[in-house]
Structure formats: C-alpha cells, structure tokens
Image (cartoon, rainbow, N blue to C red):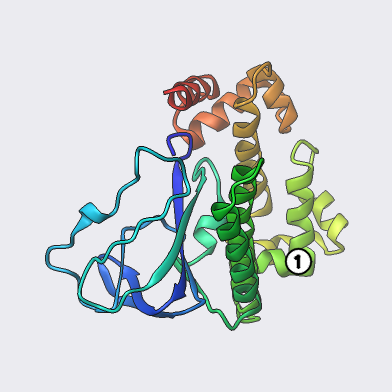
C-alpha cells in the first residue's frame, strides 16, 4: 500500500484456537478462540500459533500474494504441526503523520472477544465479506473495503466502552462531555478562529477549568491540539488537484501562507509543496 504511511493488519479466527503475540514481546501473548478478532494497530511483526515459543526457523514462504488473481484470495497451508485454524485476514492503510491521535490511543495489539457486542457485529461483517468473495458482484471491492473500515471502527468502540472511568488519553477525551464537544468543534471547524476562551464558552466551562481538563485528558493544551489537527486536515487538501498551497493555508485557518509553511515544515520536516510533490510521486509509482 505505497500510498499510505502505516498499515494495520487484522485477523479474525473463524475456527480453532491460537496464541498471538508481537514478535519480540512473547509476554504480550493472548489466546484467541473461535470468533475472536485481533488488530495489530502498531503494524508490528507478530506471530500466531498454537505454541507460545517463537519458531526457530519459521517458514515464511507460505505467506504470499498470488499474482494470477486479485484480492481477496484464499490459500490453504499448514505452517507447523499444530491443529489447523481458519483465519480471515485483512489490512487497513492510514497516515501516521503529521497527526493521527488514534494510533497512540490504542494498544499495539487489540483483541476483540466474540462474546462482546463488537465481536458479534464483526462476525456478521465477516460473514458478509465471505459471501461477497464467493459470489462477486458489481461494487464488491468497495463493499469489502468499507467492511474493513467498519470492523476497525467497531473494534475501537468496543475498546472505548471497556476503558475504566478514570482513564486518560484521546479516546477518554472523546467520551468526556465537555472535552468531547471541544474536539468535535475543532474537528468540524478547523478554520474557525478558535481561542481558549471561545472553546471554553462553547463547552460550558471556565477558561482555566477547560484548559486544565483538556490537558489532563488529552495530554496537550487545546491550542496545541488544534494546530496539529489543522496540519492533518491540510494534508488531505494538499492531495487534491486544483488547490494551491495558499488556498490550503486559508482552508485550515492560517492567515498567511508563510505561517502555514513554517508550521508544516516544523511538524512534518518539509514544506507543504515538497510534501505534495513527494506524495504524488509515491502514489503514481
């Protein structure tokens, strides 16, 4: 997926059982049973098998993409002497920079149990995907891609619902009545000339109480978060044809192109025009 900076893999165990753990962290091993799903949020190398110890000489040749057929595809292999399992696997692509708070908010290895509400919905989604694979119809590829997105979204919701009330972080901020409202306002209207006073007034808190609560939950001050979010939105505009850098700057709330260029380069490492050229080259290749 050359057009994306970060790839998230997921596996749904349809039959059998196995352990799953990050390759260099055997203590992270989690047992999966039929109906469970695991999402490798960090994109880390990982191992799945009925043995918790790392294979001395894993046969990686069984993992391949057939060149004679499009995705999705099915292959039947036995990678060891353990009991066979039936897995449905896929992946999602996203950008990690300049700002993607959800990647840091989730554990690198996220398991959704079959018994949870999210687990039941995931199984229904996967059954739909399997039917689409067996009997391809017009628009099938779009449906399959959206199913992957729905699977990820439901997994995040399931994780969020299980967080302790006292937890902090971006996801906890989303479910907080005041901070969640502030995040919604910033996300929906990044070009608005938001100030700390204006945001506090909109969410019904005093300036000091809002600033303190936002920083405690999200980990950064409100205006710093807004600046990061504006740059993330800017990358989406930069990928569109016919929009100049100056127009992008205005669309995300910067009063001048120079100020936008400085902020973008400080966060991303290159000016927005250079980022756009590199992005177009990568996608075309």
Q: Is residue 138 left or right of residue 126?
A: right
* Residue 24 x/y as whole percent: 25, 66
Residue at image position (17%, 69%) is: 55
Instruction: For residue 109, say whether it is visible.
Output: yes
Residue at image position (60%, 68%) is: 122
* Residue 184 x/y as whole percent: 77, 54
Q: Is residue 168 left or right of residue 208?
A: left
User: Where, quadrant-wise, is the C terminus in this rendering?
Assistant: top left
Instruction: Judge whether 14 appears above or below 33 on screen.
Output: above
Instruction: For residue 220, say whether it is visible.
Output: no
How many badges with numbers are in the image? 1
Q: Secondary structure at mark 1?
A: helix
Instruction: Judge whether 248 appears above or below 135 on screen.
Output: above
Query: In this view, which residue lies farthest toward the left?
Result: 56
* Residue 262 x/y as whole percent: 55, 27
Residue at image position (81%, 57%) is: 200
The residue that label 1 is drawn on is 209
Q: Nearer the viewer, residue 64 or 43?
A: 64
Instruction: Judge whether 253 appears above or below 276 on screen.
Output: below
Instruction: Judge whether 169 appears above or below 82 on screen.
Output: above
Q: Residues within 10 Å of mark 1 (few under 14, many from 20)?
A: few
Q: Nearer the viewer, residue 55 or 237?
A: 55
Query: In this view, which residue lies farthest toward the front?
Result: 135
Q: Is residue 80 left or right of residue 269?
A: left
* Residue 30 x/y as whole percent: 38, 79
Residue at image position (21%, 52%) is: 61
User: Where, quadrant-wise, is the N terminus in this rendering?
Assistant: top left
Q: Nearer the viewer, residue 70 or 146?
A: 70
């Amino acid at each position: 997926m050359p057009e994306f900076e970060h790839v998230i893999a997921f596996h749904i165990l349809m039959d059998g059982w196995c352990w799953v753990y990050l390759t260099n962290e055997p203590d992270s091993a989690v047992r999966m049973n039929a109906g469970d799903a695991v999402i490798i949020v960090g994109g880390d190398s990982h191992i799945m098998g009925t043995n918790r110890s790392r294979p001395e000489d894993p046969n990686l040749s069984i993992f391949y993409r057939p060149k004679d057929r499009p995705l999705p595809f099915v292959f039947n292999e036995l990678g060891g002497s353990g009991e066979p399992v039936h897995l449905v696997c896929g992946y999602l692509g996203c950008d990690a920079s300049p700002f993607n708070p959800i990647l840091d908010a989730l554990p690198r290895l996220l398991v959704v149990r079959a018994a949870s509400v999210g687990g039941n919905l995931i199984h229904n989604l996967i059954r739909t995907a399997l039917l689409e694979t067996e009997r391809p119809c017009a628009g099938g590829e779009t449906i399959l891609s959206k199913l992957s997105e729905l699977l990820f979204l439901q997994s995040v919701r399931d994780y969020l619902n299980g967080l302790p009330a006292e937890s902090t972080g971006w996801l906890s901020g989303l479910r907080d009545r005041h901070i969640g409202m502030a995040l919604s306002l910033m996300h929906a209207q990044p070009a608005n000339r938001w100030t700390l006073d204006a945001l506090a007034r909109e969410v019904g808190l005093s300036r000091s109480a809002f600033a303190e609560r936002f920083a405690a939950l999200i980990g950064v001050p409100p205006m710093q978060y807004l600046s990061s979010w504006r740059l993330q939105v800017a990358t989406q505009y930069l990928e569109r044809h016919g929009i100049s850098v100056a127009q992008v700057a205005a669309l995300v709330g910067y009063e001048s192109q120079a100020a936008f260029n400085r902020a973008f380069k400080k966060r991303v490492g290159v000016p927005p025009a250079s980022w756009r050229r590199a992005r177009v080259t990568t996608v075309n290749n």
